[in-house]
Amino acid sequence: MTEQREDQADAFFHALADRTRRDIMRRVLAGEHSVSALAAKYDMSFAAVQKHVAVLERAGLLTKRRSGREQLVSGDVEAVRSVASMLTELEQIWRGRIARIDELIAADLNLEEPCPSPTSGTTSTP
Amino acid sequence: MTEQREDQADAFFHALADRTRRDIMRRVLAGEHSVSALAAKYDMSFAAVQKHVAVLERAGLLTKRRSGREQLVSGDVEAVRSVASMLTELEQIWRGRIARIDELIAADLNLEEPCPSPTSGTTSTP
DNA sequence: GCAACATGCAACCGATTGGTTGTATGTTGG
DNA sequence: CCAACATACAACCAATCGGTTGCATGTTGC
C-alpha cells in the first residue's frame, strides 16, 4: 500500500531533480504550451525536450491535451502540492523529535522539584 | 547567482529521489543516529548506506557530529523547509496563471455589460 | 599495546540517465 | 493531394547511479 506512495515519491523527486524539467514545469504551470513551443526554448534537440516532458507526464506532474496536430502541455498544481505535503510530513517527524526533547526537559524539572532546594545540601553528615 | 540555487535544487531533489535516502532522512529528523546504527537498518552493505549519507550531507539535508569513534547524524529541518519553499514558488507561478484567467473572464463581462441585455435582440430588423 | 569497532575511500560493475540521430505516423493548409 | 509541420519512438552513446568488495585510518576498552 505504502509501496505505491514510495514509487510515486521516487517519480516525483526524480522528475524534479533536473533543471530543464523544473524550468518546463514553471512554463506549463504558468500556461499551456505545445511540445514544440517548449522545445524551441532550450538549446537541445526536440527529442530531448520531448523525453523530459514524458518523464514529467509519467510522474503525473503535467498532462497533455490534443489540439489539432499540437499537443498542449499543462502543469498539474495538485501534484506539486502533494510533493510539498511529503516534505511537510518529514517536517512533522522533526517536530516530534523536538516534542520529545521538551518532554525530557520537563521530566528533569519534575526530578528537581521534590528536592527541598537546588542549593540546599542533601549531605546530612554533621 | 540563481545558478547556485539551481545547483542546490538539483542536489536537494536528487538526494530525495531515493527511498532509502528518504527513509534515512525520516530517522535522522526524528533523532541522532550513528552511521553504523543506520546501516544496521537496511539490507545492504555499510558502504552503501555510508554513500547515501554522504549524498544527503553534500546536499545539506543532514549534518554529522563526531562523538568519540562514532559519527552522529542529524537531519536539518531548515533544508527540508527550503525544498518545500521551492515547490511553493512553483505553486505561486500557477496562481499567477489563474489570476490571468480571472482577468480575462472579467474583461469578457465588461464587454457584455454595454449590451442592453444578453437576450435582447440587437437585430433591429422587424 | 592491541583487538575490535566505526568510518572513509577507491575501484569496479550492471543499470539508468540525458543526450543524440533517424525514422514512422498523424494533421493541416493550400 | 501533398508538402510541411508536430509528435512519437527506437537505437545508440557517454556519464552517472546504486550497489559491491577491499583496504586504510581513527578510536576505544581492556
Image (cartoon, coloured by chain):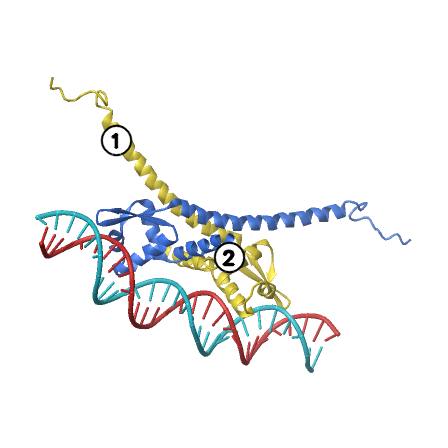
Chain colours: A blue, B yellow, C cyan, D red
Q: Quadrant of residue B97?
A: top left
- Give the side of residue B104 with respect to residue A55, left or right: left
Residue positioned 26% across, 31% down in the render: B107
Q: Which mark is residue B65?
A: none
Q: Are marks 2 and 1 in contact (CB under 8 Å)?
A: no
Cα–Cα gap, marks 2 and 1:
48 Å
Amino acid type, label 2: Arg
Name the residue beneath numbered marker 2.
B22
Name the residue beneath numbered marker 1.
B108
Residue A26 position within the rendered picture, expressed as x and y whole percent measured from the top left: 34, 49
The chain letter under disc 2 is B
Image height of C21 relative to A33, above or below: below
Farthest residue toward the top?
B126
Q: Nearer the viewer, residue A122 or D25?
A: D25
Residue positioned 22% across, 47% down in the render: A68
Q: Nearer the viewer, residue B18 or A94?
A: B18
Figure disc tally = 2
- Give the side of residue A52 with respect to residue B13, left or right: left
Residue positioned 60% across, 48% down in the render: A96
Residue B85 position within the rendered picture, expressed as x and y whole percent measured from the top left: 44, 48
Amino acid type, label 1: Asp
**Element class at badge 1:** helix
Q: Earlier in the sequence, mark 2 or mark 1?
A: 2
Q: Nearer the viewer, residue D15 or A65?
A: A65
